[in-house]
Amino acid sequence: MTAVSIDPALKAKCPGAALGCLTASVQASATSPALEEALRSCEQQILQLSEPHAVLESSAILRTRSGYKALGKDPARYRGSAEALIRRVIAGKGLPRIHAVVDIINIVSVESRLPIGLYDLAHVCGDITFRAGRAGETYKGIRKYDLNLEDLPLFADGLGPHGSATSDSERTMVTAETKSVLAIFVSFGGPENLGRYMERLAWLLAEYASGTLFQHSII
């Protein structure tokens, strides 16, 4: 399993930072009717609440915002990916439909209220460090502009930054050709529940993306 660590400087500013890492062999096939139903169910669980916007004040989302602030990044301008997905659902836009693996990640991110980085292991170079972005660092976000990474909580491998709690990069993105993935849950509130959500992710990957060979760890 690719080694993942938390930079001591980030940990000093965000003592509650913890990561849940899961690797798997998968098939990034098209969204099946059964997975489409799971996506709609996830959306409805938010929309049918008496106060859907209250989800945006959940402890996991508030702690993610606090983590961004501690690192010097404005959480109103650079949102954690889970919050961005939930806001999309509340706005009536629904979850995006990409392919089975990304769709599953989005479901679990909404359920857990935690950002989840998703990476094609064939394009990860060496070990990964979770750290704050440095001045001048950027990358091309998936279907986005170049992202200003300074002070953003991000993942960097031997070639540099490739993912963050806001948006991952094109370099290590999961495509229809991907065979092996690494998913990383980002929690700023400690490791509680990470094991449960990794089990949920593994179940969905096995059910809808032919997932096998699961390995997981909490950091």
Image (cartoon, helix red, strand yellow):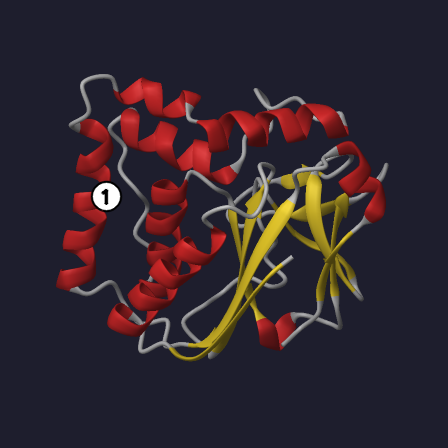
Q: Quadrant of the C terminus?
A: bottom right
Q: Which residue is mark 1?
A: 42
27 w.r.t. 44: above or below = below
Residue plotted at (19% across, 53% down): 38
Residue 87 visible in rendering:
yes
Q: Give the image location of residue 162, x and y in percent.
A: 68, 56
Identify which amino acid the numbered label 1 is placed on: Cys
In the depicted view, which residue is nearer to us: 33 or 10?
A: 10
In the depicted view, which residue is nearer to us: 186 or 168?
A: 186
Instruction: Quadrant for residue 207, please give it.
Output: bottom left
Q: Residue furthest bottom?
A: 213
78 vs 127, left or right, is left
85 vs 11, left or right, is left
200 vs 39, left or right, is right
In the depicted view, which residue is nearer to us: 81 or 93?
A: 81
Query: What is the crowding at mark 1: few (fewer than 14 residues within 10 Å), some, or many (at least 20)?
Result: some
Q: Give the image location of residue 12, x and y in percent.
A: 81, 37
Residue plotted at (63% across, 48% down): 18
